[in-house]
Image: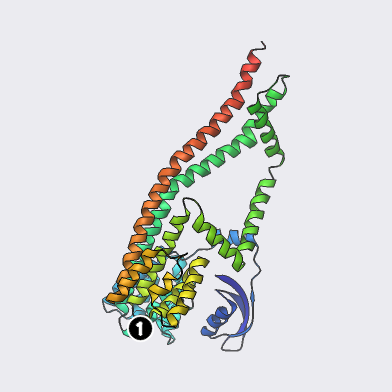
Amino acid sequence: MRRFNYQAKNSTGKLVRGKVEAPSPQEAARLLASRGLVVLKISPEIDFPLISLIRGFTTKKVSTADIALMTRQFATMISAGLPITDALLIMKAQSGASLKTVVNQILTDIDGGSTLSSALEKYPQAFSKVYVSLVKAGEAGGVMDKVLNRMAENLENQREFQSKVKGALIYPIIVVIGMIAVAAVMMFFVLPKIMTIYEDFQVELPLPTRILMKVTNFSASTWWLFPLLILGAYMGYKAFTNTNAGREKVAKIKFKFPITGNLSRQIVLAEFTRTLGLLVGAGIPILQGLKIVSDSVDNVLIKNSLVRASDKVEKGFSLSYALSQEAEVFPPLLYQLLAVGEETGKIDETLFQVSSIYEKESGYAVKGLTAAIEPIIMIVLGVGVGFLVIAVIMPMFSLSSQF
């Protein structure tokens, strides 16, 4: 999502200014118009990487867990026959700070005559296009309770899957951060004091010690370069990924990266197939479902492939054939099982089965990755500690031999 500054007039003709998040200026203008504003001017917000980074830590975001819990509560109350407004009032009282404001505004919009899907559409930072489209399908078919229950189950599965992946990677990440912190303390505080002692003695120092002294002196004298390099790398990465070619290049690197590349692909495919299966199962046409999913996918390679597949489906080709023409992105398992689903008329069930397969495979891949990372970390840590011990202790033997 991008942020835009806008100037507009409200229903009373008063000039209002503010910020809005949307994928494009056109989408931002449409979103403001749905709020009853007449847009006068809209422009992208000029954002600096440091400000963006600070905002990311300070802004309270609506998490997947919040939306999953809200959807489950909403589904339970609607299934029990409670009116939507009453259900929203109860959720407003129970919601956390990040969601309370959103729920309150949705309730206000519905009281003003808006549909639930139209009210949700005004908050893309909380409710995705997939979510809004499913609610709209539930309203049109009179099966809101079934759609909400299915969405709640999908969000809970998604949350559980993400938790498994994140949980498996916590230990290696903590160990790596600890290694970096210890190395920084040693390089900037401990080793410089030890090295000054050796410099006072006129002895020939071993090669590991001389290397360590040069590295330590360089780090101590140019420590200010490290935060600048990190900031420069971050700014360069953001500038590069703001271009279409840059995003595509980064996506290709992620998929081809050793060890983690295949895992990244499986995670994206699991999310894509589960979401498309949910849309098709709710009665949304495949073509419309593909367009919705392509807008919600972050990976530009998957997004572009889905756009091309949508064009083929629109021309009358089957979904399995359209995806088979994107063999660089989609593996044979996907379009082969889809062909079976098309023959049996159970595309949504087939998509859920494919999603389950990719979730299990990615789960196994995460376990294998963490099992491989742990000994690698221990080896790197052992080599680093061994080098420090040799570089620090060897000169002591040289000094003791002189006395």
| x, y percent for residue 172 | 46, 45
Q: Does residue 240 lie above or below 227 as drawn?
A: below
Q: Is residue 218 left or right of residue 253?
A: right
Q: Indicate the amino acid at tag 1.
A: Glu
Q: Is residue 64 left or right of residue 212?
A: left
The residue beneath circle 1 is 139
Kindly identify the residue that appears in the image at 65 percent across and 31 percent down. Answer: 212
Residue 17 in sight in this render: yes
Residue 73 in sight in this render: no
Mark 1 residue element = helix
Q: Does residue 217 lie above or below 4 as drawn?
A: above
Quadrant including the N terminus: bottom right
| x, y percent for residue 63 | 44, 64
Which residue occupies the foreground of this view, 21 or 261?
Answer: 261
| x, y percent for residue 315 | 44, 83
Which residue occupies the foreground of this view, 72 or 341?
Answer: 341
Residue placed farthest to the top in the image?
Answer: 403
Q: How many marks?
A: 1
Quadrant including the C terminus: top right
Residue placed farthest to the bottom in the image?
Answer: 12
Q: Is residue 402 left or right of residue 101?
A: right
Q: Quadrant of residue 155?
A: bottom left
The structure's colour scheme is: rainbow
Kindly identify the residue that appears in the image at 57 percent across and 76 percent down. Answer: 24
Q: Does residue 228 lie above or below 47 as drawn?
A: above
Q: Quadrant of residue 354?
A: bottom left
| x, y percent for residue 34 | 51, 84
Q: Residues within 10 Å of mark 1 (few under 14, many from 20)?
A: some
